[in-house]
Image (spheres, rainbow, N blue to C red):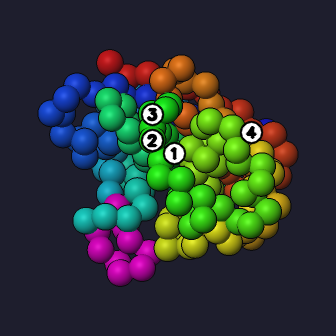
Amino acid sequence: MITVHLVSHWTAPGHDARVAADDAARAAVEAACALPASTPIAIGRRCHSCGSRDHGAPFAAFEGESAVPHLSISRAPGVVIAAACVRAPVGVDVEAAGTPLDPRLADVALAAAERPRTTAPGDLLRAWVRKEALLKATGAGLAVDPATVELHGTRVARGPAGPWELQDVDLSPGLVVSVAVRAEGPISVVSHTTP
């Protein structure tokens, strides 16, 4: 079984989102690698398309690393969530429950076979969060057309080379959270909260 450490960092209005994201990422890496809290961990970003270090997929570095974990970060109003996994690529996405989405998003984000099944309130938001988590785990993010990915619940029917495990995570009634891991078989998500 592959373990993912998920850290929630609740933020106040006006809080620097980048600082909060880096704090959550450090805490996730500490948990995934069982590091002492005093371990200096650098969090950076690298865009796989343009090479920029100002944006893109997050990564961690620390001295004496034996296995730098795979890392993903997502944020919604009032919260930043970071996921770290030592053994496999990971992606996480979060949205506030009830976030209004333009219904036309279904035409852009859903595969044709998904549209008839995405009718209940919140279905489009849940599908979007799952796809974002999956595409973050690939490292490509939304550079991949989400309509080329077909999900049946948390099962990937068509999409990036896998195998993939998707899991919805119940952190708070006000949040929709999903984690994706390039793995075959069950994953375990361990949740942590920072102050």
Instruction: State which region is magenta.
Output: 45-53
Closer to the chain start, of discs 4 and 3, is 3
Residue drawn at the location 36% of the way across and 31% of the way down: 79
- Mark 3 lies on residue: 96
Select label 4 or label 3 by which is in front: 3
Q: Is residue 68 above or below residue 146?
A: above
Residues at discs 2 and 4 in contact (Cβ within 8 Å): no
Name the amino acid, label 4.
Ile
On residue 93, which mark appears?
A: 1
On residue 60, which mark appears?
A: none
Name the amino acid, label 1.
Asp
- Mark 2 lies on residue: 100
Closer to the chain start, of discs 2 and 4, is 2
SS majority, magenta: loop
Residue drawn at the location 18% of the way across and 33% of the way down: 15
Name the amino acid, label 3.
Ala
Residue drawn at the location 35% of the way across and 81% of the way down: 50
On residue 187, which mark appears?
A: 4
164 relative position to 59: left or right: right
**Residue 101 spot, x, y in % from top left:** 47, 47
Question: Farthest residue toward the left?
Answer: 14
Name the amino acid, label 2.
Pro
For residue 158: magenta? no
- Separation of residues labelled 4 and 3 (CA atoms): 24 Å
- Separation of residues labelled 3 and 2 (CA atoms): 9 Å
